[in-house]
Image (spheres, grey):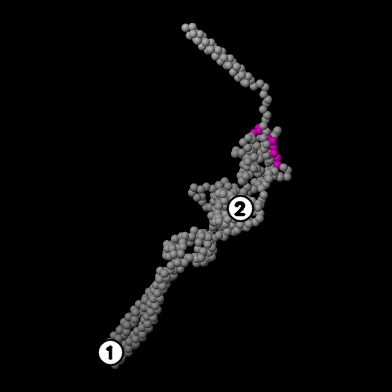
Amino acid sequence: MRFLNRALLGLFLLAVTIGLLGLAGGSVWQALQASWSDEGGSRPARERVFSAEVLTVTPSQATPVLTAFGEIRSRRTLELRAPAGGTVIELAAGFEDGGAVEAGQLLLRIDPAEAQSSRDTAAADLREAQANFAEAERALVLAREDVAAAETQADLRRRAFERQQDLAERGVGSAAAVETAELAAASADQAVLSRRQALAQAEASVDQTSLSVERRAIALADAERRLADTELRAEFAGVLSDVNVVQGRLVNANEQIAQLLDPEALEVAFRVSTAQYARILSDQGRLPDVPVSVMLDVFGLDLAAPARLVRESGSVAEGQSGRLLFAQLQETRGFRVGDFVTVGLEEAPLRGVAVLPATALSSDSRVLVLGEEDRLEEVAVELLRRQGDDVIIRGPEVYGQEIVAARTPVLGAGIRIEPLRPTPDGADAEVTEPETIALEPERRARLIAFVESNGFIPADVKERLINQLSQDEVPARVVARIEDRMGS
């Protein structure tokens, strides 16, 4: 019993000791938290200053360039269709996609056997009709001579009848002789009438055979036309495209077999918005006669050609908007139908405007102006045009002041900056890339092989590229553009 009492007393003392230790630990923890929460005297934060490039806004005159994308078309495009049905027995040399033909050149011949037979039959029918006509003319001549002979005989019969009447009046002749002479004269008159009827029939036969000759001649001309339709000739000099016929193929009449394009009569069709269209119109509401630049990007060698704005579409196609304009190319070297090109059209000059980098303008047409103590102020300007990486603005409030050339998310109104101004001589601090580079033999061979195997490059452009790549120093831009295409 004494052992149990001592054990309970020990447990009680252990519990009290643990409780006192916990209370002491809590007091120490609270003291540490109070000490840590005491901030004491901290130094004020230093204002952060950012560096930014600035430029001076100078008003001047700028000529906006309307940029659009268009497609090269041919102003003379002829669908070549089979003029007759049958088997193709002959094709011109070079009758294939891209083949060049001359005006009047024989392109295709269809088996003319049936048409030739029809023509020969029509010619034989015409000769038969001509023979019938000649026979009818000869019969007409004979009928006229027969009528003349019958009239002569009738005249003789009438004179004999008159003599018998005269003799009877003088009492020499008899009544029977007079009657006989009268019957003979009547019979001669009847014979004249019969000969005249034969003459009328002969004249009608001549008319009928003449009409038959004309019909046979028309039939012969029609047969000759069908025979001529077995040959297809080029209406003008050009190149062929979309060829889908070979020798020995059976074609149907009016079936399209190719297209003939005039490579010298090219134009570009490009679409502009209604607002852009309204800006380029003259005061009389007509399209201005202004130069247009057409550019085709070919592996770094930009093919450029001048053009003239000639016309606009008469209506807006269903589902489209804006206006479709057409410019006639004055130089067609290197361009092909279907090329996707960039079109530049100069608008009327704008006065009292400023040209700024596009990075200087915010989405709501505001710029950051450098104010007092190099702090920024936000000023609204009027955006007139976007020209590639530049913008044309009008804002008298910022003329003559310095603005931030490239806005960043950390820059805004009230921010203090360290302005970076361009050097007086305009030298660029960045190291420019070399314009030409020397190529290693393996790299040169790889580039030349890629250009030679590319079927989309025109022959003259391909030759010019190979000549450039064969030089000791090659334009770096050309090499970069070709290698970009090789990696795509």
Is any part of residue 288 visible from this angle? no
Q: Is residue 433 magenta?
A: no
Q: Is residue 387 left or right of residue 121?
A: right
Which mark identifies residue 177? 1
Q: Is residue 423 left or right of residue 156?
A: right
Q: Position of residue 254 (x, y in %)?
A: 44, 61
State whether residue 45 is above or below residue 188. above
Q: Residues within 10 Å of mark 1 (few under 14, many from 20)?
A: some
Q: CA distance from mark 2 to mark 1?
A: 133 Å
Q: Is residue 437 left or right of residue 260?
A: right
Could you tell me the amino acid type at mark 1? Ala
Q: Is residue 419 magenta?
A: yes
Q: Pick whichever of labels 2 and 1 is earlier in the sequence.
A: 1
Is any part of residue 317 visible from this angle? yes
Per the image, label 2 sits on a secondary structure element best described as helix
Could you tell me the amino acid type at mark 2? Arg
Using the image as rendered, state which of residue 299 and residue 84 is in the foreground: 299
Residue occupying the point 41% across, 73% down: 120
Per the image, label 1 sits on a secondary structure element best described as helix
- Foreground mark, 2 or 1, reads 2
Using the image as rendered, state which of residue 451 and residue 387 is in the foreground: 451
Q: Residue furthest bottom?
A: 172
Which mark identifies residue 443? 2
Q: Position of residue 483 (x, y in %)?
A: 59, 50
State whether residue 329 is above or below residue 202. above
The segment highlighted magenta reads 413-422
Residue occupying the point 29% across, 85% down: 183
Q: Quadrant of residue 216?
A: bottom left
Q: Residues within 10 Å of mark 2 (few under 14, many from 20)?
A: few
